[in-house]
Structures are given as structure tokens and as C-alpha cells.
Amino acid sequence: MSVFRSFFDHPDFRQRVGVALLIIFIFRFGAHIPLAFVDIQRIGSLFEAGSALGFLNIVSGGGLSRFSVLSLGILPFINASIIMQLLVLSFPTLKTIQDEGESGRKQIAQYTRYLAVALSVIQSIVLVLGLGGLVAKPSVGMFDYVLAVISLVAGSSLVMWLGELLTERGFGNGSSILIFCGILSALPADFRSIYILLSAGTSVLNVLFFFLLLGGLLLGIVISQEAIRRVGTTFVRRVSGAQSSVSKSHSYIPFKLINSGIMPIIFASAALQLPTLVAQIHPRFVSLVAPLSNPDGFYHGVLLILLIFFFSYFYNAVTFNPTELATNLNRQACIVANVRPGADTVRYLDRVIGYLTLIGALILSAVSVIPSVAKWASGVSVVGLGGTSLLIVVGVALEMVRHVKTYLVSNSY
């Protein structure tokens, strides 16, 4: 209720919400504008939920299934972020730039934007050449395909800009919010599919069992997203006076159970769909990636789990530096409880984050495969909502709530 009260009490908050809704409206509106050369009638079931390109369609907010100008969505920016982080780890020059503080991070962000535009050009060409012929109108010329590539690149750049505007509004990561909106936009179609399934004679108990499993998974996701590991610390202060004494105060460092949040599962799902997109260029590539084309298949699940583990450890290696944290604690006269300062603290913190990364990767892996098991056990396979989608929805929703609460608290004084 306090959020709704603040909406009317704070003009700045109303303005932020209004701008955010306008950005989302533009994103959703653009997802319904098809490219000029596309024959809507020929698209058919090419991008049905659960198909090989299902996740790409979710990322684009449903734009890919309509071959809209926003078909690529935020995918080029996600891929550029992955590549740029790898480059920062590989090249000391980029690492030095990133460590320069706010100016360095802005420069790396600018490089990421340039790379995202370059990737959008490549992916646009692949999309138009690979799938364009399947949905093109009769007598389409080369100019139409060139115009389609330009439109897709412009649309991808627009989505990247909209995501940054959302981030500036203070509601969390703008790219994640756009993906969040794309997932929610697919829910009406899922409920319609369930209604058709029930009308065809599917048992109500099977549908209830499916939703019961998803409900338990949803509860587990919320608990794991909010869980933290508290590492006890002690601040030592020397008090000067007639008689010098030592003052101690106790606190803790909170480490999230899933420190990387939803990013590993987004990166893993996006990376897993790239071979499928590239395979559309030539039919022989389709047979090579066929074992990975079924999102509910065994090979797809195994590779997804491996990628989740990789990106979980990679993300934490990029964002967490135990040596730097131990140095900062030492400067503040703070010691970790029952651990000697210096090298012992570094090893202890590294061990803690490694343990949490392992547990987080296991949880993310379970979340990614449980919906497929639920579909198999209940027979309700028409729902496109999977573990990846659920995790993104919960993670983004919790992040937005935290950012809104932080903003309201900071503006109440």
C-alpha cells in the first residue's frame, strides 16, 4: 500500500513510473510491426512456444514470431556483454580501463554498445537469409532484404537504448525488465492453450498437478533468491583518551545464495539458441543441431546445465574479488570472525563464494529442468512457460521491488 500511496505523494515517482510505462509500451508496440517483406500468413507455427526458437521469441517480446522490426530484441546486447566480459578477463588493457572507476565502466559500456550493434548486423543477416525465404512475400527483391537488415539493426539499437532508459529510471536492470515484459506477454497464449487442452478432454487433475509443481518451483525460486549467507565480522577501534582502550563492534557481510541472480540462466539460454539460429542458413546444419532443438529434450537439458555452471562461475569470477574485499576490510580495521587477516581471509572468502556458487548453480540447473519434467509427468506440454522464464520473472520482480523500496526510503527524508 505504501507504494501506491507514494505514487500519489511523490510527483517524481509518478513521472518515473509514467516514463517506464511509455518505454514498455513502445517496446510492445514495436514487437507488432512486421518487416516490409514478410507475409504474415506464411509464418504459421514456426515460432510456437516450446520450439527451438522459443527462447529467442521470448527475449524479443514476441517480436520474432511476427518477424517484427524488434525481432532481435535485447539478444545482441546480451551476447555483446558476454563477449566483452571475456575480453576484459583476457586483455589487461581492458581490465585497466574497467578498474578506473565510473569513467572506466562507462567506456567499457560504450564498447559493449558498439559490439552489440556489430553483432546485430551479423544476426540480422543470418535471420533474413536463414528464415526470410520461409516467410517472404512473392517477388521480393534484394532491396527488400537489405531494408529488412537495416530495420532489424535499427530495432535492436532502439531496444538497447530503451533498456538503458529503464535502468536510469531506477527500477533495476532495463534489459531484464524488457525480457520480463516479453515473458508476461506470452501468458495469455499459454492459458488459451490450456483451455483448448481441457476442451479436448485432458484431465483437470493433470493440469492441476502441473500447476502444483510449478507453484512449488515458484516458492523455491523466491526462497533461493532471498536467501543470504552471513559472514560475521568485527570492527576494532582504538579509543584515545585519559586511558586508551579498544572498542569492538560486530556485524556481518551478506552474501546472496545466488549472487549472480538470473544472468547465468539468461546467458546460457541465449548461447544455446545461437547454433539453432545459425543452422537456418543451410539445411545440413539443421541435422547437426537437431539433438539440441527440443527445449525439453535430454541433450538440450544437459548442455543447458553445463552452460549454467560455466556462466555462474564466470559471473562470480568477474564481479567478486576476494583479495580486494580482504584489503578493504583490513583498511577499515575489520576482521572476519575466527579468521586471521591477510591471506587467510582471502582464502576463506574465496572458499565461501565458491561454495555459494556451486549451490547457486545447482539450484539454477534444477529450476531449468524441473518444468520439462513437470510437462512430461503431467502431459501438459503446450505451455511455453519454463524454468528459465519463471526464474527471470521472479528475479526481475524482486529486483524491481527492492529498487522501488530503496527509492521511496531515500526520498522520505
Image (cartoon, rainbow, N blue to C red):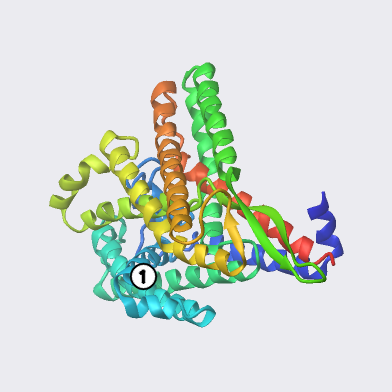
Label 1 neighbourhood size at 10 Å, few (<14), some (14-19), many (20+)? many
Amino acid type at mark 1: Met
| Residue 133 seen in this snapshot | yes
Residue 299, horizontal then vertical, whole percent: 26, 38
Query: Can residue 138 be seen from the camera position used here?
Result: no
| 235 left or right, relative to 370 | right
Viewer-nearest residue: 393 or 51: 393
Write the residue at 57% across / 52% down. 396
Residue 379 vs 308, above or below: the answer is: above
At 36% from the left and 70% from the top, the residue drawn is 84
Residue beneath disc 1: 84
State the quadrant of the C terminus. Answer: bottom right
Q: Position of residue 100 (x, y in %)?
A: 47, 81
- Which residue is situated farthest in the front direction here? 243
Horizontal and vertical percent position of residue 257: 52, 45
347 to 390, vertically: above or below: below
In the shown orientation, is residue 138 left or right of residue 75? Answer: left
The picture quadrant where one finds residue 80 is bottom left
Local SS, label 1: helix
Residue 259 picture location, percent across and down: 51, 52
Residue under the image location 33 percent in, 44 percent down: 304
Q: Nearer the viewer, residue 309 or 52?
A: 309
Report the label total.
1
